[in-house]
Amino acid sequence: MTEWLNILLYIQIGLSGVCLYRIIRGPTIPDRMVGIDIFGILVVGICAIISIQTEKSFILDIGIAWIILSFIGTLTLAKYLTGKKLNE
């Protein structure tokens, strides 16, 4: 089972590199934000795989905190792009 988890971990890390390229070279701000969202999802997957391998549950807490911050950032960008203030 660990062999499959290692393969999945390497795939997730490779896809994270692709997302980082999209974040750096994205033509527009929304494209970069989509890359950041996908990167956040991949980080949560990496945290889940590492948590299973090491049998430490606090690593999942890090992933959950990461995805909550990513969600708040997405909402903030969506409000900004629609031209509304953050308190509306």
Image (cartoon, rainbow, N blue to C red):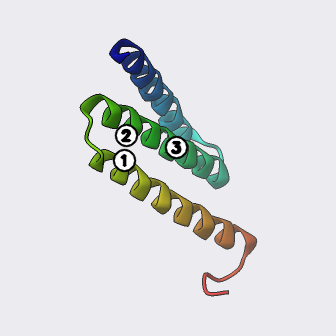
| Residue ID at (27%, 35%) | 55
| Outermost residue to the bottom | 87
C-alpha distance separating marks 2 and 3: 10 Å
Of marks 3 and 1, which one's residue comes earlier in the chain? 3
x, y (%) of residue 58?
Answer: 28, 50
Q: Which residue bears the numbered disc 1?
A: 60
Decide: is 56 above or below 11.
below
Amino acid at dot 2: Cys
Point out residue 46 in the picture as x, y percentages from the top left corner.
Answer: 40, 35
Q: Which residue is mark 3?
A: 41
User: Which residue ends up furthest to the top in the rendered image?
Assistant: 3
Residue at x 34%, y 32% (from the top left corner): 52
* 38 lies left or right of 4: right
Left or right: residue 27 versus residue 5 is right
- Under tag 1, what secondary structure? helix
Q: Nearer the viewer, mark 3 or mark 1?
A: 1
Three-letter amino acid code at the position of disc 1: Leu
- In the image, is 59 to the left or to the right of 18? left
Neighbor class of circle 2 (other Cα within 10 Å; few <14, some 14-19, many 20+) is many
